[in-house]
Amino acid sequence: MATNYAAPRSEASILSTNKLIRNTYSLLSMTLVFSALMAALAVLIRVGPGFGLVCTLIAFGLLWFVLPKTANSGSGIGVVFLFTGLLGFGLGPTIGYYLSMPGGPQVVMTALGGTGVIFLALSGYALTTRRDFSFMGGFLFVGLFVVLAAALVSIFFPIPGLSLALSAAIVMLFSGFILYDTGRMVNGGETNYIHATVSLYISILNIFTSLLHLIGFADD
Amino acid sequence: MDWLKIGSTALIVAMMIFIWPAAKHMLHNSPEAEKGDWQSAIFPILAVICFVFLLMWLV
């Protein structure tokens, strides 16, 4: 009887984890499509970089002030779509810049495909091995801090080598975040699919923009 | 005055301010890595780096 008492709890936990993963990837795929459509719209109407930055600022305002209050309700899904739509729209000027370069469409499509491959490979690895990557948490957040500080320096001292190194560091850092976030979903550290979706979306977005920079440099 | 630079700086500083509590919490409360944990994380990230180099070479 003692052994049977343990089994239903474990089965419920597995079902709950599977539901979380299913909901997360469903919402993530929908928000990625929506974000891409918004980015395409921004490219078509030729949104300026200033407007793109305003959209990004509003998106992060939503992330910090609105999402924590709505993440446990249905309105959280609307907030996630608004957040990803704004970030996609804000990315439009960057994509438009790369599309205007010679060989630009190839650069953008290579970055897009590369991001997809990286995300699917890392997610597949974390899901199949079911490893707990939570030990990386401190290292990743400190790394994020260092990257943000370097980004601040690069704004005022635009050194080409620094910005490339920054892009490479961002790809590595957010690859680590994909492992960390997926591991948390699998091992029960994250139970809210809205939070999980937002975390993975931010990782994908940052990897994509960094790949754009790296591949754009290589093409140039 | 370059408003893009000011806006970008404001965004990055805001990010650092909001991320700091989480970073501090993680530094103190992250579990210790066990044997083989870091290898299991570093190998896929190294593979990503090689893949990015491949993409840059192919373009």
Image (spheres, rainbow, N blue to C red):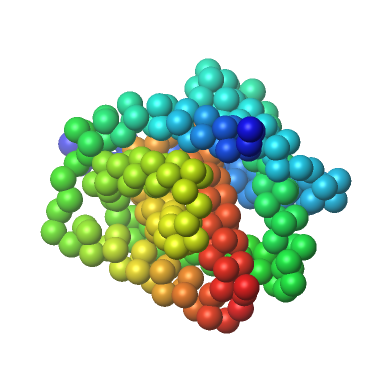
Task: Point out the image quarter for the C terminus of chain A.
Answer: bottom right
Question: Nearest the camera: B38 or A26?
Answer: B38
Residue at (18, 62) in percent of width and height:
B36
Nearest the viewer among B31 and A160 is: A160
Q: Is residue B58 above or below residue A85?
A: below
Residue A141 falls left or right of residue A213: left
Choose top left, top right, bottom left or bottom right for residue A131: bottom left
Residue at (50%, 61%) from the top-left corner?
A160
Which residue is pictured at 71% across the width and 43% down the height?
A49
Asked if one can make out residue A18 in the rendered structure from this viewpoint, the answer is no
Relative to residue A51, is residue A217 drawn left or right?
left
Residue A46: percent from left, percent from top: 82, 47
**Left or right of A73, for residue A167:** left
Instruction: Tell me which residue sits at (19%, 33%) in the image.
Output: B28
Q: Quadrant of the N terminus of chain A?
A: top left
Along the viewing direction, whichever of A60 and A157 lies nearer the viewer: A157
**Image: A92 above or below A51:** below
**Looking at the image, which residue sits at the far left?**
B35
The percent coordinates of residue A9 (x first, y second) are 32, 36
Q: Residue A2: x and y, percent? A: 18, 36
The image quarter in which residue B44 lies = bottom left
